[in-house]
Structure formats: structure tokens, C-alpha cells
Image: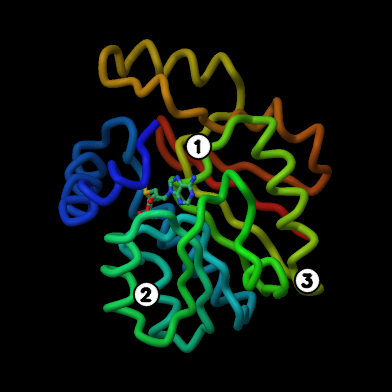
């Protein structure tokens, strides 16, 4: 699992490496641009004003929402990712903190119209995901939604197929979403497969 130091080192090349994997249509980032665009449109069409981004990275998605007038909050543990994102969004409220320990205090005491997490929550175990997402649901304003874009599958069999195809490229440190196994904890959970290896999970309060 990459640490905050690992993400600091990756930060300056991150956008390029993601773009290349997406353009090649290969695991792990096949579908990345489409996923971010879809979430972007859904957040705007729901007229969400306050948006929390968990693991915002270089701020690719949140910067677009910021430019459309959304009030952006975020948490990430990488200094360098925070620097890059803050340059693009000077007025965003970005905090450093490890989300495996929950949200930092200031963020935990707010409510949001939309909470987004793209390619970040696979750093949590499934048990951690369930508990973190249950807490996040309580931080949504009435009518709000959580949008997760990530390497994700409807079933364990679909994950296994992708793992076989990826061969040595597969990252065994990351814990990907399997909708079938998580939905029992979340009655409102919805899943859309967006590429051979990634999808969007939506939760409503
Ligand atoms: C693969 S990048 C995704 C960035 C961005 N959301 C995107 O879609 O391009 C994962 C991000 O999550 C952050 N991250 C990973 N594990 C974390 C943790 N335990 N606590 C806080 N941030 C974490 C990393 O620093 C990195 O910025």
C-alpha cells in the first residue's frame, strides 16, 4: 500500500500516468476520465454547493467543481498532492489527514451536499470501508449523495477475471470494491460498471 511519502513521489507524474493508462484502456485507470466527468455532471445537476473530496490527489475533479462555484473541502495525506491541488483552488479548504483514521475534526463537524472519492478508498479494507461510509452518510445534507469512482466490480467473479487479465500488473495491496458484497450494508447503494475494471458507486442519505 502506498504511504503518504509514496504519493508525494508520484504526485508530479500522477496526471500523466493516469492519462496513459486510461487512453490504453488498461487496468487500473481504464474509464478514469469518463468516471470523473460523470460524477462532475451529477454533482452539478443535483445543484450541490458544498462538496467534500476524500483523497483529492492533484484535484482533477474538484478543480472543475471549484471553477463552477462549489465550496470545496477535502482531505488527503500527501503534502505534495495538497500543494498541487491548493495551487489550483486557493480558496478550497484542504486538510492533511489519514482517512483510515476517519475525517479530521474540522471536516467531521460539517455537512455536505456531495461527498466524492475517486480512486482513493481502495486503500481501506472492506470493514474499514463499511464503517467509514456509514459515518460519511451521516454527514450528508438532506438529499445529498456520496459518489465513489474506483476500480470496482459487480461480483467477486468479475474482479477475478480482471485480475487474471492484468497478470503481473495487478496490485495486491489495494482492496477493490465488490458491489455484491458491500450492498448488504447499504440499502441505497447503486453500481454502474464504467470500464472493464472500474465503476461508480452511489449512496444516498
Ligand atoms: C490514486 S490517487 C486519486 C486522486 C484523485 N482522487 C483522482 O481521482 O485522481 C489517491 C489519493 O488518495 C490519497 N490517499 C491514499 N490513502 C490515503 C489515506 N489513508 N488517507 C488520506 N489520503 C490518502 C493519496 O495521497 C492520493 O492523493
Q: Quadrant of residue 189?
A: top right
Q: Is residue 90 above or below residue 94?
A: below
Which residue in the structure is indicated by mark 2? 63
Which residue in the structure is indicated by mark 1? 122
- Whether residue 157 sits left or right of residue 19 in the image: it is right
Q: CA distance from mark 1 to mark 3?
A: 26 Å
* First in residue order: circle 1 vs circle 3: 1
Circle 3/circle 2 CB separation < 8 Å? no
Q: Label 2 neighbourhood size at 10 Å, few (<14), some (14-19), many (20+)?
A: many
Q: Identify the residue at horizontal 45%, vertical 36% (top origin).
A: 151
Circle 1/circle 3 CB separation < 8 Å? no
Tell us which disc is closer to us: 3 or 2.
2
Q: Identify the residue at horizontal 44%, vertical 14% (top origin).
A: 161
**Badge number at residue 171:** none
Q: Identify the residue at horizontal 52%, vertical 19% (top origin).
A: 158
Which residue in the structure is indicated by mark 3? 143
Q: Position of residue 4 (x, y in %)?
A: 36, 47
Q: Label 1 neighbourhood size at 10 Å, few (<14), some (14-19), many (20+)?
A: some
Q: Is mark 1 within 8 Å of ligand 1?
A: no
Q: Position of residue 142 (x, y in %)?
A: 81, 73
Amino acid at each position: 500500500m502506498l504511504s503518504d511519502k509514496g504519493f508525494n513521489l508520484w504526485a508530479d507524474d500522477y496526471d500523466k500516468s493516469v492519462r496513459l493508462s486510461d487512453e490504453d484502456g488498461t487496468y487500473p485507470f481504464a474509464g478514469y476520465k469518463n468516471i470523473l466527468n460523470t460524477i462532475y455532471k451529477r454533482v452539478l445537476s443535483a445543484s450541490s454547493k458544498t462538496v467534500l473530496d476524500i483523497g483529492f490527489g492533484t484535484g482533477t475533479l474538484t478543480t472543475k467543481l471549484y471553477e463552477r462555484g462549489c465550496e470545496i473541502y477535502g482531505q488527503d495525506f500527501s503534502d505534495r498532492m495538497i500543494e498541487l491541488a491548493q495551487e489550483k483552488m486557493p480558496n478550497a479548504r484542504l486538510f492533511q489527514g489519514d482517512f483510515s483514521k476517519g475525517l479530521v475534526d474540522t471536516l467531521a463537524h460539517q455537512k455536505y451536499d456531495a461527498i466524492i472519492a475517486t480512486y482513493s478508498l481502495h486503500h481501506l479494507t472492506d470493514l474499514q470501508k463499511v464503517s467509514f461510509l456509514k459515518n460519511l452518510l451521516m454527514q450528508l445534507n438532506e438529499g445529498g449523495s456520496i459518489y465513489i469512482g474506483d476500480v470496482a466490480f459487480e461480483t467477486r467473479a468479475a474482479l477475478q477475471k480482471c485480475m487474471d487479465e492484468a497478470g503481473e500488473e495487478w496490485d495486491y495491496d489495494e482492496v477493490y470494491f465488490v458491489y455484491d458484497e458491500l450492498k448488504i450494508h447499504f440499502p441505497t447503494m447503486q453500481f454502474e460498471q464504467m470500464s472493464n475494471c472500474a465503476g461508480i458507486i452511489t449512496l444516498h442519505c
